[in-house]
Amino acid sequence: MKTLKSNRSLLAVDGDSLAHRAYHGLPKTILLGDGRGGGAIVGFANFLLRLYESEQPRAVLVGWDTLDVPTYRHKAWPEYQSGRHFDQALLEQLALLPGLVSACGFANGKAAGYEADDFLASAVAREERRGGTTIVVSGDRDTFQLASERTTILYPVRAGEMARITPAEVRERYGVDPKQVPDFIALRGDPSDKLPGARGIGPKGAASLLGRHGTLEAVLATGRFPAQAEQLRTFRSIATMESSAPIPRLDDQKPTWGRAASLAREWQLNALTDRLVARTAAVRS
């Protein structure tokens, strides 16, 4: 395994999570030159610029969902994430955002059958094997399972503010270690993903069971939840991020803000163009 040339962290970003927040947080009156919506693009770009400036990473990977292809999670539990609806304007902007990431000189992770979080998990696993550190940015608390001595989660809590989630914060919030988070989700359930969890078990009950037994398998071995055992194993599998998701090489990167500014200019997003041009000038000075 190649050793790192830089002691700076890798920045791994859940693109869909930030794009959704941007879409719902900015006016729908922000438009591209052709009349299509542009608020999610502007908001996402602003997020990305702030993150790059604050974290100064050695490289950036942005993970994306593939919304038109089911994953193994959907096949294992057909109700998984059912009922979700995305505005056409958001879908159009999600299709454009990987191009903006590439124009910035950063890497994308996207492949049929995987979710954005899987690419983050894959990047974290690779970086930890190489002795590096990672900053993971996501509004999905499932990513708390990635927290370690070498990996910190940046979790948006309100406009412009992010909580830094370490293993200690995971234990404080959930009462379990990061590696137990998939077991915790399986037992507690996750309404946003339509996972019902174990009958009669809430967050405190799930944490208590894992505190006594350590893992879901150990809980099931005591004879608890016999009628739900296989279902709970399925929920745990669904909640576990796939650390073998295919990602590109993540050598140290040098941002290409000028290319990104040209793309923003093509879209006639003038304020974003000016911001990217300013970044280009700052790098040169």
Image: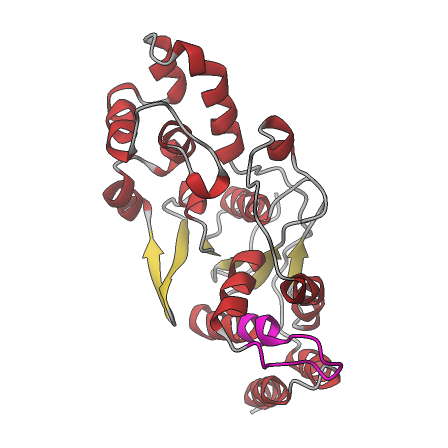
Is residue 37 located in the magenta-colored stretch of the structure? yes
Looking at the image, which is closer to me, 1 or 49? 49
> Which quadrant of the rendered structure holds the C terminus?
bottom right
Looking at the image, which is closer to me, 131 or 37? 37
Reply above or below: 157 against 223.
below
> Residue at coordinates 52% horizontally, 28% vertically from top-left?
237
Reply above or below: 214 against 273.
above
The count of marks equals 0
Q: Position of residue 93 (x, y in %)?
A: 67, 67
Q: Main secondary structure of the magenta part?
A: loop
> In the picture provided, is 149 more to the left or to the right than 77?
left
Find residue 100 and report its image quarter.
Answer: bottom right
Find residue 196 and report its image quarter.
Answer: top left
> Which quadrant of the rendered structure holds the N terminus?
top right
Q: Position of residue 234 (x, y in %)?
A: 52, 24
Which residues fall within the magenta stretch? 28-44
Reply above or below: 217 against 38.
above
> Residue at coordinates 64% horizontally, 65% vertically from top-left?
106
Is residue 82 located in the magenta-colored stretch of the structure? no
> Residue at coordinates 50% horizontally, 65% vertically from top-left?
57
Q: Position of residue 205 (x, y in %)?
A: 25, 28
> In the picture provided, is 277 more to the left or to the right than 50?
right
Q: Position of residue 250 (x, y in %)?
A: 63, 56
> In the picture provided, is 155 more to the left or to the right than 26?
left
- Image colouring: secondary structure
> Residue at coordinates 57% horizontally, 38% vertically from top-left?
243
